[in-house]
Image: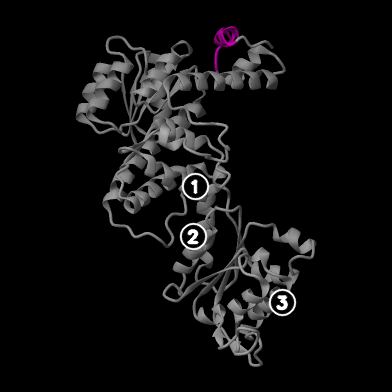
Amino acid sequence: MQTRLLIVEDEPEMLMFLKRFFRRKGYAVTAVVSAEEAWDAISETEYDLVLCDLVLGGMSGMELLHKIREIDRDLPFVILTGAGSIESAVEAIKLGAFHYVTKPFKRQELEITVQRAVEYGLMHRRISKLSDASESDGGPIIIGNSRKMQKIMTIVGKIADADTPVLLQGETGTGKTVLAKTIHSLSSRSQTPFVTIDCGTLPENLLESELFGHVKGAFTGAVRAKRGLLEEAHGGTVFLDEIGELAVSTQVKLLRALQEREIRPVGGNHPIKIDVRFISATNRNLKNAVEAGLFREDLYYRLSLIPIRLPPLRQRREDLLQFVGRFVSEFNRRHNKKVTKLSPIVLRKIMELPWKGNIRELKNVIERAVLLADGPVIDGDCFAAGDIGGSNGTDPLPSKPVVLKKAVEEAEKMAIRRALKLAGGNRSKAAVILGIGRRTLYDKLAAYQIDD
């Protein structure tokens, strides 16, 4: 089904441009010239987004937003405004507008803002549905719909049912464990054990015993024989997490298990046949470890027959809202909360933060915000507590209107200085880079007291 977009603009040429532009992008567009017509349209049709000029003849965009919020708290509302009306646009955001775009605008900027606003509305509807559903926690939750993750899932679909070893690489918190479970669940081994072995948490002697088992009397304290996890996982999948931390001596034994499909318990004399599928994961560069003599080259090539690198969250921001929606739902159930919305300010902050800790950090931040929320909305106050997004507390989320206004001004100053630098001080070129008129740039230079 097409996304339904209502455009409100009283300048005929601009209205025609917006109508054609978004229809080419695949939207079902209704275009009107007044807020009164827009209100009538909303009374008859359910829209996914309203894109509205702030200054209109008759009822203003702000008044239309007021009326909409009386009947619908979730309908995304994007403001189009002139450079001189930014303060009013910020006021509209306080009333629940998703964001504003300053005229003249860049087409890509407008398209991205509209797309994010639509996703924002869809996410809130999804949160409500998920909160009502009795989904079980644990197991593979979500992978993501970004282009990068879809390419990865195409590969996963081709290799899931093979017994070929898979090496998952990527930064901490990028979802390697979830992807490993997904591969297992898509394979013919899905009804057999999925055994996780963390190679970085146990000392060498204990890890060998965990992997391969031991016979009675093999070492001090071995009062009885013990089956190793590789034997326990017979018929299933073994997930070797943090494989880069494995000691070289243990690497030799693991290589034999991979090649011969058999293990020898610590202190034992007889090999034991195993039938397992190996999936490994690491946040280290194993090629560098091989060159440094810290990881066996033959084991590396054996483990990495199918190498998959998971991108960090900052490179797949299209997936952010999907994760947020799922996590809010999960923590509503876990903590008996009823959060159904995130304020537009919080959503924009989520989209902008670097998320150095990736999905794991995002999940922790959302859990904290759900716990601190006093009602159904996660606002700036409960989201800003503590260090988030790898910011170390140096970039707190503005929660008061005056702070937001200053944040907007500082962002504009930074953008102007950057554009001037890129343009070598040429104001006309800087205006083009910023997507604003030269006169507007001169006004801002004067207002912000920026010297070339």
Q: Label 1 sits on what residue type?
A: Ser
- What residue did someone put label 3 on? 252
Image point 54% across, 48% down: which residue?
358
Answer above or below: position of 90 versus 373: above
Q: Is residue 262 magenta?
A: no
Image coordinates of residue 387 in percent, x first then y, are 53, 39
Q: Depth check: 161 or 358 in front?
A: 358
> Which residue ends up furthest to the front in the rendered image?
221
For the N terminus, give its image quadrant.
top left
Chain-order first, disc 2 or disc 1: 1
Give, as a single range, the part of the protein colored magenta.
Answer: 436-448
- What residue did someone put label 2 on? 178
Chain-order first, disc 2 or disc 3: 2
Residue 182 horizontal side relative to residue 254, left or right: left
Numbered disc 3: secondary structure: helix
Q: Which image quarter: residue 92? A: top left
> Which residue ends up furthest to the bottom in the rendered image?
270
Q: CA distance from mark 2 to mark 1?
A: 16 Å
Q: Is residue 61 visible?
A: yes
Q: Label 3 sits on what residue type?
A: Val
Image coordinates of residue 68 in percent, x first then y, are 26, 25
Image coordinates of residue 443 in percent, x first then y, are 56, 7
Residue 188 horizontal side relative to residue 298, left or right: left
Q: Which image quarter: residue 426? A: top right
- What residue did someone put label 1 on? 146
Chain-order first, disc 1 or disc 3: 1
Neighbours of disc 2 within 10 Å: few (<14), some (14-19), many (20+): some
Image point 70% across, 14% down: which residue?
425
Numbered disc 2: secondary structure: helix
Q: Is residue 447 magenta?
A: yes
